[in-house]
């Protein structure tokens, strides 16, 4: 059709080559007005609502929920309606478009298969005055552009909610129109959805059919999110053959395959790219040692002490608080210490940056970590907060493991990892004492730093952690 207009997927400010369709707000044949919500897209950092660039009839949509669309390829096709408001030629839409030709063969769509958030105790609640095990974080880091995308609650179908809130409600099988909104201007918040998923009747409005809260309609709405008992799950998993106790013979690999391959998307998709890039550009070397924290007085926060020790080690050995350019063979030593805090979630790995950690006191560090953790959980963190750190920290010890070989992501030179704390018998003055030990691992890019520099860095950390306060 000669008067049709093709709308290509814009660069959503993430610097990534593709995005995943979460939910269409229109269908083919619908009429949409300029700047009304068109589609919700998931990138590696956020769920973003893309507005319509024109007013008119929707002729074609790129795919279904879960499909991956390459940046710069067709997202939707419209027949503009001259009787409705249109954007003037050359008017800035706020998005940059990549010509489809630049994408080439990669323009084909990929079909992936289909969160509860992983709790990180280091980021939960207010600062504590008692010593505790630290938050769940994992090895690695994530890159992002410096562009910032501000998300706003948009009304769709008369319901105001952030894109991430809509996505969570859809994943949990909840009807947003039945969730009691507690946000400003009647906005449904992430907490409202979680309360409804937890089965709280107070969080649900009466169903349109007239059934009261807690009646049959409510039970059906929450059926998909209420877990069955452990006994029921175990019984469901027992097949007739298994219950009979007969041996089961499996096939060699390749003869029969159960399940289907799924495309990585969002955060995990970007992580795969970043890890491959790190493997190609970094010559990693890891040093391991233990920090004896027996002298700690009650009130020490593990995360705060780890961050403080990294800061002091960076001041003692600046070579590890640096960026390295492998192509130009140049390095940049940073006067400030911005620490990337690796945060594990069910959606994948996030590494928000704790800026200027070298000038923060203990309370400032704790409040900063709590803020970053909360923003990661509700996917409201700006892209600019997920890049630009000078060194990173991974506390995988919340789950298990003593030592690790964490991944250095360029341009950073080093990453610190803390393993699971343990008590160890130590020979002291002819006798023995049980001391608390925190295992440490430091991986560094041997192209940019020497083994001696890394060893002195690790010793500076150990010396600081050995202090009582």
Image: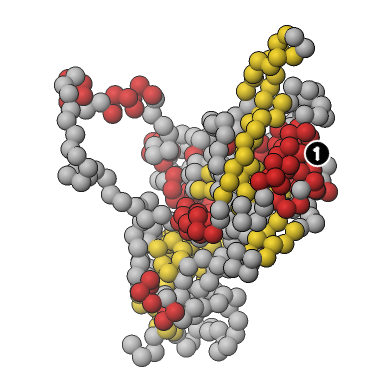
Q: Residues within 10 Å of mark 1 (few under 14, many from 20)?
A: some
Q: Is 339 located above or below residue 440 in the figure?
A: below
Residue indicated by mark 1: 362
Q: Quadrant of the N terminus?
A: bottom left
Is residue 4 toward the left or the right of residue 432 in the image? Answer: left
Q: List x then y, in percent, for residue 199.
A: 49, 34
Residue lying at 74% horizontally and 22% vertically, measured from the top left:
294
Residue 182 visible in the shown view: no
For the C terminus, the image quarter is top right
* Pick the front one: 134 or 13: 134
Residue 329: percent from left, percent from top: 64, 66
Q: How many marks?
A: 1
SS state under label 1: helix
Find residue 48 and report its horizontal and vertical position in percent: 54, 62
Q: Residue furthest top?
A: 431
Q: Quadrant of residue 461?
A: top right
Which one is in front, 331 or 394? 331
Q: Is residue 76 left or right of residue 292?
A: left
Front residue (pair 377, 89)? 377
Residue 349 percent location from the top left of the image: 54, 48
State left or right for residue 416 relative to residue 29: right
* Whether residue 246 is visible: yes
**How is the structure coloured here?**
secondary structure
Seen at 50% across and 55% down, the residue is 279
Residue at 73% in and 43% down: 457
Identify which residue is drawn at 35% across, 67% down: 109
Above or below, 74 relative to 22: below
| Image: 87 above or below 67 | below
């Amino acid at each position: 059709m000669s008067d049709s207009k093709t709308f290509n997927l814009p660069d959503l400010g993430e610097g990534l080559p593709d995005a995943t369709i979460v939910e269409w707000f229109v269908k083919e044949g619908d009429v949409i007005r300029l700047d009304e919500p068109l589609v919700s897209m998931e990138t590696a950092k956020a769920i973003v609502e893309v507005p319509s660039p024109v007013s008119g009839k929707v002729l074609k949509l790129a795919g279904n929920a879960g499909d991956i669309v390459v940046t710069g390829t067709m997202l939707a096709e419209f027949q503009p309606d001259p009787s409705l408001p249109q954007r003037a030629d050359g008017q800035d839409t706020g998005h940059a478009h990549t010509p489809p030709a630049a994408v080439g063969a990669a323009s084909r769509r990929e079909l992936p298969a289909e969160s509860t958030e992983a709790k990180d105790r280091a980021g939960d609640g207010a600062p504590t005055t008692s010593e505790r095990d630290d938050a769940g974080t994992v090895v690695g880091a994530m890159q992002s552009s410096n562009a910032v995308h501000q998300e706003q609650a948009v009304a769709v179908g008369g319901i105001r909610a952030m894109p991430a809130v809509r996505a969570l409600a859809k994943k949990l099988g909840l009807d947003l129109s039945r969730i009691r909104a507690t946000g400003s201007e009647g906005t449904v918040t992430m907490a409202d959805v979680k309360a409804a998923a937890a089965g709280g009747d107070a969080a649900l409005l009466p169903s349109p059919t007239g059934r009261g809260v807690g009646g049959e309609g409510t039970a059906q709405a929450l059926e998909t999110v209420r877990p069955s008992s452990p006994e029921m799950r175990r019984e469901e998993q027992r097949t007739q053959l298994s219950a009979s106790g007969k041996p089961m013979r499996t096939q060699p690999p390749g003869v029969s395959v159960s399940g289907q391959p799924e495309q990585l998307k969002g955060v995990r998709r970007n992580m795969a790219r970043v890890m491959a890039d790190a493997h190609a550009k970094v010559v990693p070397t890891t040093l391991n040692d233990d920090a004896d924290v027996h002298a700690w007085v009650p009130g020490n926060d593990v995360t705060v002490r780890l961050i403080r020790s990294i800061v002091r080690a960076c001041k003692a050995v600046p070579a590890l608080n640096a960026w390295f350019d492998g192509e130009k063979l140049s390095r940049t030593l940073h006067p400030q210490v911005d620490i990337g805090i690796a945060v594990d979630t069910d959606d994948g790995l996030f590494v928000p940056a704790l800026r200027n950690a070298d000038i923060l006191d203990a309370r400032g560090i704790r409040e900063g970590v709590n803020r970053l953790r909360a923003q990661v959980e509700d996917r409201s963190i700006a892209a600019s907060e997920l890049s630009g750190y000078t060194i990173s920290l991974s506390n995988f010890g919340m789950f298990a493991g003593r030592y690790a070989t964490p991944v250095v992501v360029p341009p950073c030179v080093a990453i610190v990892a803390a393993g699971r704390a343990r008590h160890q018998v130590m020979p002291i003055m002819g006798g023995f004492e049980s001391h608390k030990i925190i295992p440490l691992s430091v991986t560094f890019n041997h192209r940019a730093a020497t083994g001696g520099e890394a060893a002195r860095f690790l010793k500076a950390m150990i010396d600081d952690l050995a202090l009582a306060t």
